[in-house]
Amino acid sequence: GAGVSQSPRYKVAKRGQDVALRCDPISGHVSLFWYQQALGQGPEFLTYFQNEAQLDKSGLPSDRFFAERPEGSVSTLKIQRTQQEDSAVYLCASSIGQGSHEQYFGPGTRLTVT
Amino acid sequence: DQQVKQNSPSLSVQEGRISILNCDYTNSMFDYFLWYKKYPAEGPTFLISISSIKDKNEDGRFTVFLNKSAKHLSLHIVPSQPGDSAVYFCAASAGRAGSYQLTFGKGTKLSVIP
């Protein structure tokens, strides 16, 4: 079956613009995670959904970051009024459900804010 | 404060020899550990995992060892192949505490020399 897909793969935004990043998880996967990966670093947790419920958003760096998963499948990460420090790769991962630790990642969206 | 540490940014190994990648952690709530492999411009790919109730898990050429008292784990690849050249990330989760988000190290870049 298909893996996790993300779009767009690359996004260039001018400082102050809003962006929306999309994630299509593996079909049937209940849990969905967003991570941010800066250059030379490991991925860092942003937020977690179980079905449509956002159970943890403790990693979101500011209130400019917002994520949703309204029907419990596709998720969107929105960043308002982008800043240069938002430049990073945004990774989405899904897992089969509670109790499962293995997460499967998409290819990521590389966001560059100029 | 890094809770998962990979102290070697890079490692070079001759083809056919053993590659040993190390990882240390500080959070005693972590109860599940995973290794991911990442090629440039791709998302991390799940490789192998181990629960804290075990001290070893093997899958083909890959073996993960866990030393809970030392809060240390290692990934052994034998024999190493040129296709193993990638960045390897160690990750941990605290499922017992209800937290399935992954905490990653900064990665070790493995180069397998033909």
Image (cartoon, coloured by chain):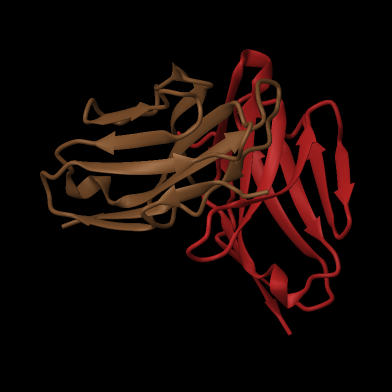
Left or right of residue A12: residue B91: right
Question: Where's residue A68, x and y in %?
Answer: 37, 26
Q: Residue furthest left?
A: A16
Quadrant of residue B13 in the image? Answer: bottom right
Front-most of residues A62 and B72: A62
Left or right of residue B97: residue A75: left
Image chain in brown: A
Front-most of residues A64 and A49: A49
Left or right of residue A87: residue A110: right
Which quadrant holds the N terminus of chain B?
Answer: top left
Front-most of residues A49 and B96: A49
Image chain in red: B
Left or right of residue A62: residue B23: right
Question: Where's residue A109, x and y in %?
Answer: 39, 52
Question: Where's residue A91, x and y in %?
Answer: 46, 45
* Residue at the (77%, 29%) spot, across then down: B69
Is A43 situated above or below A113?
A: above
* Residue at the (65%, 50%) spot, across then down: B36
Callout count: 0
Is B44 situated above or below B11?
A: above
Which quadrant holds the C terminus of chain B?
Answer: bottom right
Q: Is residue B61 visible?
A: yes
Q: Is residue B110 visible?
A: no
